[in-house]
């Protein structure tokens, strides 16, 4: 299973930039928290990064977020993007699994899900959304929520449609 920093490292640079741009435009507190975490990891003040041109700053931030020491910041960053931009996909998945949720957010996950329901839910997502976004979501879901469902893990490892491109 991929952790959050690994997800950012394996997703396409285009999607990583899209996520960071979305957070920059839509969730200033999450962006600021991410920027601050990166600055601390690089042993610089946040203002140092803020003064860089946005494109250069974003390259620096995305590079740093692929490191293990920033896994917590990467997790918060990915979670914010998923819940804010992809809530419908989250709801589609959880509703297909018959898991009670509030706009894609779950209080209690079952310890296991039926294979047929899981496969149907994944097929639903793959039919409606870009495969890379689905792969990021399902990996994040399994990692961030601690679902640990063996059948989801197997799908993520073996279904080629759920493999991330790997850019490093």
Image: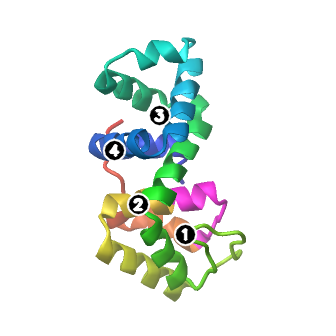
Q: Tell me the quarter of the picture where residue 153 sits.
A: bottom right
At which x and y percent is residue 116? Answer: 50, 88
Is residue 145 rendered magenta in the image? Answer: yes
Mark 4–mark 1 CB contact (< 8 Å): no
Q: Which residue is mark 1?
A: 104
Indicate the secondary structure of the residue bearing disc 3: loop
Image point (60%, 29%), residue name: 69
Q: CA distance from mark 2 to mark 3?
A: 17 Å
Residue underneath mark 3: 66
The vertical placement of 52 against 129, above or below, is above
Which numbered marker is on residue 166?
4
Q: Residue at x 51, y 86 (%)?
A: 117
Q: Nearer the viewer, mark 4 or mark 2?
A: 2
Task: Give coordinates of residue 152: x percent, y percent.
Answer: 53, 70
Question: Distance from label 4 to label 1 (Cα)?
Answer: 27 Å
Give whichever of discs 2 and 3 has the lower sequence position.
3
Question: Where, quadrant-wise, is the N terminus in this rendering?
Answer: bottom right
List x then y, in percent, for residue 43: 57, 12
Gap in angstroms between the C-alphas marked 3 and 1: 25 Å
- The residue identified by callout 2 is 135
Q: Classify mark 2: residues with Cα within 10 Å, few (<14), some (14-19) or many (20+).
A: many
């Amino acid at each position: 299973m991929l952790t959050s920093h690994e997800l950012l490292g394996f997703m396409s640079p285009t999607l990583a930039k899209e996520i960071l741009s979305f957070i920059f435009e839509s969730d200033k507190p999450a962006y600021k928290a991410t920027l601050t975490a990166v600055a601390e990891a690089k042993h610089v003040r946040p203002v140092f990064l803020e003064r860089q041109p946005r494109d250069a700053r974003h390259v620096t931030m995305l590079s740093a977020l692929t490191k293990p020491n920033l896994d917590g910041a990467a997790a918060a960053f990915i979670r914010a993007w998923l819940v804010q931009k992809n809530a419908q996909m989250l709801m589609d998945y959880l509703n297909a699994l018959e898991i009670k949720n509030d706009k894609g957010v779950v209080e209690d996950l079952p310890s296991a899900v039926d294979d047929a329901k899981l496969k149907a839910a994944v097929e639903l997502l793959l039919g409606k959304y870009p495969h890379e976004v689905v792969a990021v979501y399902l990996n994040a879901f399994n990692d961030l929520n601690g679902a640990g469902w063996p059948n989801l893990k197997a799908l993520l490892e073996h279904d080629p449609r759920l493999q991330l491109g790997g850019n490093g």
